[in-house]
Each structure stands twice: as C-alpha cells, then as structure tokens.
Image (cartoon, coloured by chain):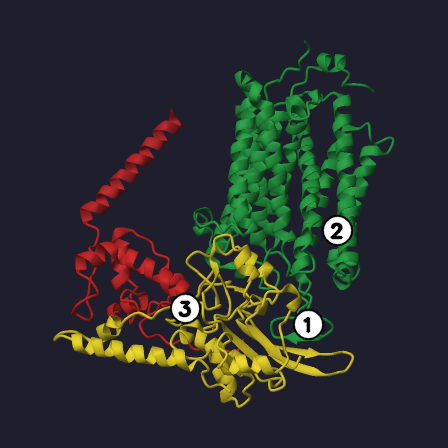
Amino acid sequence: MTEPNDKSRRGFLGAAAVGAAGLGVAAIAPGLHLIEVSQASAPSQGASSKVRWGMLIDTTKCASGCDACVKACNTENGINEVLKDPRQASQWIRKIDLKDPKSGIAHSLPMMCQHCEHPPCVDVCPTGASMKRADGIVLVDRHTCIGCRYCMLACPYKARSFVHMTLTEQNPEVPRGQGCVESCTFCVQRVDKGQIPACVEACANAEHNAMLFGDLNDLNSAIAQRVAQVKTTQVRADLKLNVGVRYQGI
Amino acid sequence: MMIQQQTKTDDGAFYFALAVGGLISAIGVAAALYMEIMGHQVSGMNNQVFWGLPHVFGIFLIVAASGVLNVASIGSVFGKKAYKPRGPLSGLLAIVLLAAGLAIIMLDLGRADRVIIAATHVNLTSVFGWNMILYPVFFGLVGLYVWTLMDRSKNQYSKTVGTAAFIWRLVMTTGTGSIFGFIIARQAYQSAILAPMFIILSFAWGLAIFLIVQEIMYARSKMELHPQLRARMKNLLGVFIGAVLYFVAVYHLTNVYYAKQFEFTHFILVSGGIFPLLFWGGFVLLGSVVPLLLLYAPGFNENKGSVTAASYLTIAGGLFLLFVFIIGGQAYPLDMFPGMQVTSSFFDGKVDSYTPSLPEILLSVGGFAIAFTMTLVGVRVLRFMPQDDVAKLQSAGYLHD
Amino acid sequence: MVRLLALMAFLIMGAVASLAAHAAGVPKPVIKIENPGQCIAATEDMRVNHMNMLGHQRDRSLRQGIRGEKANLNGCINCHASKTTGSVIGKDGFCESCHTYTAVKVDCWQCHQPKAGYKAAGIKP
C-alpha cells in the first residue's frame, strides 16, 4: 500500500541519476571533489502537468491516538519550535477525531493541506507567493510571502500556519521562517527525489497503512485504482475545489 | 459678503498637540517594530485568530477614508452648495485616513520589511491585489481633486475629477468589502451584501469623523458653525446610521435564511459571550441607538455637543461592529464535517478567544495618532477650514429653519 | 539659528566619526576557501553574479520543481561552510564576512539553514 505508486517516474529518475553520475565520473578530473560530482549531475525535469499528486486516507485504518504521521512530519520538516501559546504553533498535519452525535460512530483522521485544484489561498494571495505547481502541489514561496495571512482566512481546512517566532533549527531542505505563512508541502523535497511523503511512510511503519500517496492521473497507480473502486469523500466538496487529498470511510 | 474669517490659532496649543500626536504615533511604530523583531508571538494573535486589533483599526480607517470623501462629492458632484466649502477638508481627511489605515495594516505584516513586494508582484485574482491598484489611484485622484478645489484657476475641473474620485471610491470600498465577501471558507463572510454594506459603513464613519474634525477646527478658531448647516449634516449622519443598521440586519438575515448559517448567527448574536455583548451593547445600543437619540430626540438635537457626541459614538460603534465581524468570524470554528463533533490538537471545532496584547493596542492607537498628526499639520499649512458665505447660502434657500 | 548650529555640529561629528573609521580601516572580509578546487564558475563571475544565479534557480526549483541545478544554495553551503562552525554565517563565515564588508543585507537565513548537513529534530506538538 505504501509502495511508491509512480514506478515509471521513479524509474526514470533513477536512470537519469545513474546516467548523470556516469557523466560526472567520466568528466572527473584530478583535483575535483566528490561534492562537485553531485553538483555536476543534470538537473531534474521539474514538475509535470501530466502528474496530479494526491493522497487517499482510509479512516477505517487510522487509529485514534496514533500520531505517527504528525511526528514524522515534524521531524522531516524541522517543526520543532516551542511557543508559550500552543495556538501560535505551526501544525502542518494534525489528527482530528470525529464523532457522530447520533450514531456514536467515531473516526480519526489526519488533516493537512488538501492540495486543491482550485486553491482559494492561491486566489487571494496578493503577491502570488501562494502557488500551485504543475503537478498539483500547493506551496508558499517564502521569497515573496509578506505575511498578510489572507490565505489563512481563505483556507477552508485551516491548513495554514503563520510562523510567530524566529527560527534557527530548520532542515536544510525545508526552509521556513518567521513572519511567513506555511503549510504541508506533500514533502515536496522527498517527492522530487521519487520518495513518498514522511507521514505516509510513518503510517506504514506503524503498520496502519491508512495513507496512500501517488499520481491520481496515472490510471495504473494504486491510488487511482482505489479511488475508482471505493467511495471516497472530499472534505467540503460543496466548495468544488477538487482537492488532492481524499478520505475513505467517513 | 459675510464670510466668517479664520482667526489665527495659538502656536503653543498647536505644537503641544503635534508633540502628543507625534509621540503616540512614534510609540505605535515602535510597537510594530518590536512585533517585527520578536515575531507575532508577542501579539495576542494566533493561528486561529490571525487578524486582530490592528486589522479592526486599520480596516476601519480605510473604510472611513472612502466615506469621508462623501462630503466633497455632495458638494461638487451633486452640487449641494452647503457642502462645497467642505470639499478640501474632506479630501485631506480621505488621504490622511487611508494613509493611516494602510500604515497599521502594513506595519502588522509578518514581513513588513518586504512590503514593496506587494507593489512589484501583484496577483490580480486577489482582492488584496486589486487594492494595490485601488489605493494608489485613490491617493492620486483625491490629491488632484483637492488641487482643483483649492486652486481657483483649476476650479472648472473639479466636477470631472470629483466624479472620477466618487466612482473610484465606490469601487475601492467594494474592494474592501470583498476582502471578506469572497471568502468562501468561513461562515461569517462569503456574502455579496458585504460590498454594499461596507459602502454604507463608510458613509456613516466618514461623516462622523468629518463632523468631529470640523467641530474641533471651529472651536480652536473661535468660530461658530451655522446651526442650520449643522442641522443638515446631523440629519445626514442620522440617515447613514439608520442605513447601517438596515444593512447589518439584512446581512444577518441573509446568513440565516439564504446561507443557513444558523449556528454561526446564533453564536455571534446570542451565545458567543463577548461577541453578542459587543454587537448589541457596543454597536447597536451605544453606536447606533444612542447616537440616533442624540441626533433626533427633542432637547438634545439642538445641541452642538450632542452632534459631536453622536459622531464619537458612531465611530466607537463602528469599531465594535468590525471587532465582532473580524474577530468573531475567525473565533468561530470552521465547519469541515457538518453534523460531527470535532476535536483535535489544533483546536478544531473549538471556539477561540482573542485578547489583544499591548504592542497591538499601541500600534492600533498609533494609527489613529498618525491620522490625527497628519490632519493637524495639513490644516495648519493650508487653508482647509470650511468657511461659509452665510448670506449667499441663505439667499439660495439652504438655511431654512 | 541655534537649531541650525546644532544640526551642523551633528553633521560634522558624523563626518569625523566616519573618517576615523576609515582611517582605522574597515576590516577586510575573511575569505577562507574550505574546499579548494573549482567552484561552479570562475571566481570573478561568482563574485558578481552569484545572487542572480541563486535568484533564478530558486524560482525554478520552488515553482517548477527543477532540482539539482549547478547553482543551488545548499550546494554553496555544503562546500563553503566553515569546518569549525559548520556554517556560512557567523563572524568569519563565508557569506557573512563579505556581506558585512559590502553592507549588503540578505534575507536567506531567516528561512534557510546556514549549517551544512544540519539535521533538525522534530518534537511532538
């Protein structure tokens, strides 16, 4: 379930890496260091509009009280600051517990940026810092974010957080900082390397396998096949945002 | 000709007021700088209520800026002679209030140091993006308008420029209302009525500010506003306050009947603690009913103090209304899973609270001080004092009892 | 008149202070190359154009997802970080010493990690 469902893309990346490394080795000259070899490899093709990254969350498998996905997200993305007021802390992914007051049926599920096809945050951003990549991943460009928080008002999922303090403990691959708005990136730094998001990996490692990541456009991918077979829900489907994160079992 | 002459104000009082205004402005800017360095952790804002007191005060000033220009428009666009001498002051206040409102909003940005990006990267699908065009053009148009009003050789253009400014101002406040009107995510907003509602709000708030400034200028210059003129403007304020009540009522009715936001409306009007209190006690009673009584009840309505008091209360009521609208709208949880009980570590399904911290209060008050100081300097260096040719107005039938 | 004199005195004092600073000599930047060898371009080119290289690359990387370009900030940091502090900033850091000397303020480190290969630990919220 957690196997990468975009084998062709991964395979291509792998082959490209080997090829590039080969070129690098061939071009290597005395006095050159390894670090330059990595820099000499050809850049990746970038996000393709043929791909639509998405996630399917099976709430019947998601355990209440388990927060493996949240912990993995915090580790991967360096979300480690402590704020006096917990309401000021950043949460890229959170666990929500639902209870139907009539039937008493309970669900547990992770909630994060839903990576909408028509993201309200992108519509309202005055500077264009909120943006959607060709492959459907919604990101904040912190180079142009002015910290107005209008996107937080516009997001129906409360997926965005504002960084309330100076940060120094970032991971090199996940820049984030004070005064900018941020949210789940689908672990774009991993996805671009052909890996799956940290939360999905952690869910599998915890043997819940409630999260599935892949290309919704690739009919052969596990996620596309599951979405075609089972009844899935988009949260706030009434808004017609065509989200990238689907839920099963609610 | 019987034009009331402006008498020279005393220097001591001017410099004292300038020093006080400047000091409070400076403290406000310093408070913003402190928030900028420490991060917004020193504010009462958080990731649920992320627009706080600075937005209430800033948006109030921006809305009032558009409305205060009404006085000039009535004079030169709609040709009402009694308002003509008030055009330049009205234009000055429009520029000053917009500048002060924008100052608060921009100083509160997470990255206020990069505010220039807002001008260099404009996303035209964003209502904020439109504002990056609407506000500068407003400054330009109103500046030009004041010029055509004050320079006799350019008077002939004042109607054309005034009409342009009038239309632009309506568009601009439509933009301000649409900041919230186009937010589909939240129960409090997503309503087409917000654009016209904000225009009516601007009329009332702008006129209230104008009346106060005019009254202070007359008092400082030991001049007396003609009672009939005051009565005219007082009646206009009354009409605007009534119209605001009407629009706010329709907004809530639309939310209940059309959008079916029962829980939210119940929260904001009945069960939501501080918010219903501020709505009914602050906005409806203090900010609307009492001013209407002051303006119309026999015994009060002749009194110039009661017009000024009504104006101050209208402003206070406006701030209460915006507080309920902006803060209350965020404090109420997003309804992601209708009919479900929702709990999480991120306060989903929970009503949030907001207590402004000192730096936010200082910044907000500082914004008002910036407006005060700029007005003070403006009326000192140029002739903005409305001076009425009472005889002329009388013969034109403008001063009936 | 008094105010004018005070202003002039202030300006003169400022000028004297600035001259004194120049006489003492502003300390030259410490440019320590931790990994001698070839950079991605000639030194002169890097000195003049590194900001353009990084600026264009950052947009391609973030907005288009093009990874592994020759110019990239983490590449710079990995090669140029001080072997003692592990960072490109700090007093004699590769980036900071020059930027202090030229008085060019950069925003990079408000979001980017200036330490090479840094591993941040996550916590439970």
Residue named by callout 3: A47
Q: How crowded is mark 2: few (under 14 residues within 10 Å), some or many (20 or more)?
A: some
Nearest to viewer (mark 2 / mark 3): 3
Judging depth in this view, the residue of B166 and B386 nearest the camera is B166
Residue named by callout 2: B251
The colour assigned to chain A within the rendered structure: yellow
User: Rounded to the nearest whole Å, what is the CA distance between mark 2 and mark 3?
Assistant: 44 Å
Q: Quadrant of residue A23?
A: bottom left
Q: Residue B120 carries which label?
A: none
The three-letter amino acid code for the residue at tag 3 is: Ala
Report the chain holding disc 2.
Answer: B
Q: How crowded is mark 1: few (under 14 residues within 10 Å), some or many (20 or more)?
A: some
Q: Position of residue C76 (x, y in %)?
A: 27, 66
Q: What element carries label 2?
A: helix
Q: Where is residue C96 in the image (x, y as percent from the top left)?
A: 28, 60
Looking at the image, residue A166 sits to the left or right of residue B5; the answer is left
Q: Is mark 3 on a helix, strand or loop?
A: loop
Report the chain holding disc 3.
Answer: A
| B32 is higher (above) or lower (below) than A108 | above
Residue named by callout 1: B337
Q: Quadrant of residue C62?
A: bottom left
Q: Position of residue A90 (x, y in %)?
A: 53, 68
As drawn, the residue found furthest toward the right would be: B298
Q: The red chain is which one?
A: C
Q: What element carries label 1?
A: loop
As drawn, the residue found furthest toward the left would be: A30
Q: Which chain is green?
A: B
